[in-house]
């Protein structure tokens, strides 16, 4: 079974020069195939430069999805245009949704979409918590009202969920073990069980209900396949079995101290 490197919520805009050197050294010491990053790599004005740094430091194919922070200081449209143009210039750096189904080995496939917290868990109108998405991402900031901003987030989440459904349909036809990269956890079960994030007001901001529904349906429809979800967003490390053939890993993360993890895939839903 293949081994990959996985990281999430690197937030390279918070990393010192010494931190960049340390991160490069971690890559040199790691023995694995592809490098998968599940969002919040940087911020929009420097995202492509930071992706090029990661690809150079890792010296292996880089597959990524975008997190909410990757759009800060820009728009969803301009960031997507930028990463698509980067892939044309640097074929080893691939945004996962348009990359399609990536064969990690003869029986293991990688797919991914960004995922957006869509307010389908908890009460999005009662929560007292607000993410910087509402003022730093162009399409969301210009929506005006809380209801308008929620509509934008749900439209983005629903589009990702639809694309993920298509990708999963293709993946199960070619591989028995499916790895799904996304940024926002698709399941309430993947949230911390203790600490401040257990407050119900966080639910609308920490879960993508649309992608969760699609993944559950795919796992139920293909019980002889295994599904492993890799995500981030909360910065709280979680490893949880959702169903017997569906497992979700959330990466732990700290600003200024990015972690890179080697994963032995061992059949998709196990690690």
Image: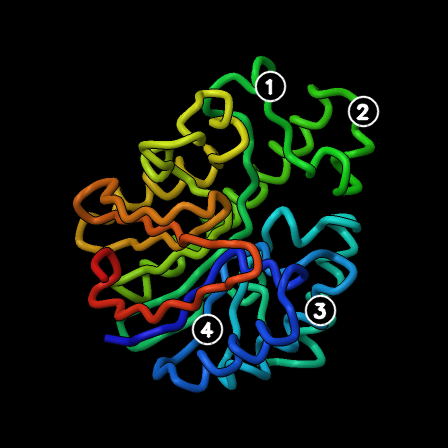
User: Label 4: how many residues lie within 10 Å, few (<14), some (14-19) or many (20+)?
Assistant: many
Residue placed under numbered mark 1 in the picture: 128
Element on which disc 3 rests: helix
For label 1, the SS is loop
- Pick whichever of labels 1 and 3 is earlier in the sequence: 3
Image coords of residue 69 (percent x, y): 65, 49
Residue in the image at 55% along x and 51% along y: 114
- Residue indicated by mark 3: 48
Q: Which quadrant of the figure has residue 226?
A: bottom left
Q: How far apart are marks 2 and 3 (CA)?
A: 29 Å
For the point 43% across and 76% down, the residue is 34
Disc 2 secondary structure class: loop
User: Which badge, 3 or 4, is on the more N-terminal residue?
Assistant: 4
Q: Earlier in the sequence, mark 2 or mark 3?
A: 3
**Nearer mark to the viewer, of 1 and 2:** 1
Which residue is disc 2 drawn over?
144
* Whether residue 11 is situated above or below residue 220 in the rendered picture: below
Residue at the disc numbered 4: 35
Alpha carbon separation for disc pair 3 and 4: 16 Å
Direction from residue 228 to residue 144 in the image, left or right:
right
The reply to whether dot 1 and dot 4 touch (C-beta < 8 Å) is no
Disc 1/disc 3 C-alpha distance (Å): 33 Å
- Nearer to us of marks 1 and 3 is 1
Spatial separation of the CA atoms under disc 1 and disc 4: 37 Å
SS category of the residue bearing label 4: strand
Q: Quadrant of residue 157?
A: top right
Image coordinates for residue 269, horizontal then vertical, percent: 24, 56
Which quadrant of the rendered structure holds the N terminus? bottom left
- Residue 56, horizontal then vertical, whole percent: 59, 83
Camera-side residue of 123 and 192: 192
Mark positioned earlier in the residue sequence (1 or 2):
1
Please tell me which residue lies in front, 164 or 196.
196
């Amino acid at each position: 079974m293949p081994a990959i490197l996985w990281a999430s919520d690197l937030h390279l805009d918070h990393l010192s020069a010494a931190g960049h050197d340390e991160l490069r050294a971690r890559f040199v010491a790691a023995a694995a195939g592809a490098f998968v990053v599940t969002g919040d790599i940087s911020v929009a004005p420097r995202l492509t430069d930071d992706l090029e740094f990661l690809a150079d430091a890792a010296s292996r194919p880089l597959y990524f999805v975008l997190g909410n922070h990757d759009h800060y200081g820009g728009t969803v449209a301009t960031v997507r245009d930028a990463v698509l143009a980067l892939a044309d210039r640097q074929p080893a750096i691939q945004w996962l949704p348009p990359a399609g189904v990536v064969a990690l080995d003869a029986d293991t496939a990688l797919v991914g979409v960004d995922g957006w917290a869509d307010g389908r868990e908890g009460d999005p109108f009662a929560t007292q918590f607000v993410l910087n998405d509402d003022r730093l991402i162009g399409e969301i900031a210009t929506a005006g009202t809380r209801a308008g901003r929620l509509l934008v987030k749900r439209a983005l989440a629903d589009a990702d969920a639809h694309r993920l459904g298509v990708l999963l349909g293709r993946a199960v036809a070619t591989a028995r073990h499916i790895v799904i990269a996304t940024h926002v956890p698709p399941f309430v079960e993947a949230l911390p069980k203790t600490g401040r994030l257990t407050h119900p007001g966080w639910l609308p901001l920490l879960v993508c209900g649309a992608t969760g529904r699609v993944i559950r349906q795919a796992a139920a429809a293909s019980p002889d396949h295994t599904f492993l979800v890799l995500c981030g967003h909360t910065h709280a490390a979680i490893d949880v079995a959702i169903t017997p053939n569906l497992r979700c890993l959330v990466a732990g993360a700290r600003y200024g101290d990015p972690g890179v993890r080697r994963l032995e895939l061992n059949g998709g839903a196990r690690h």
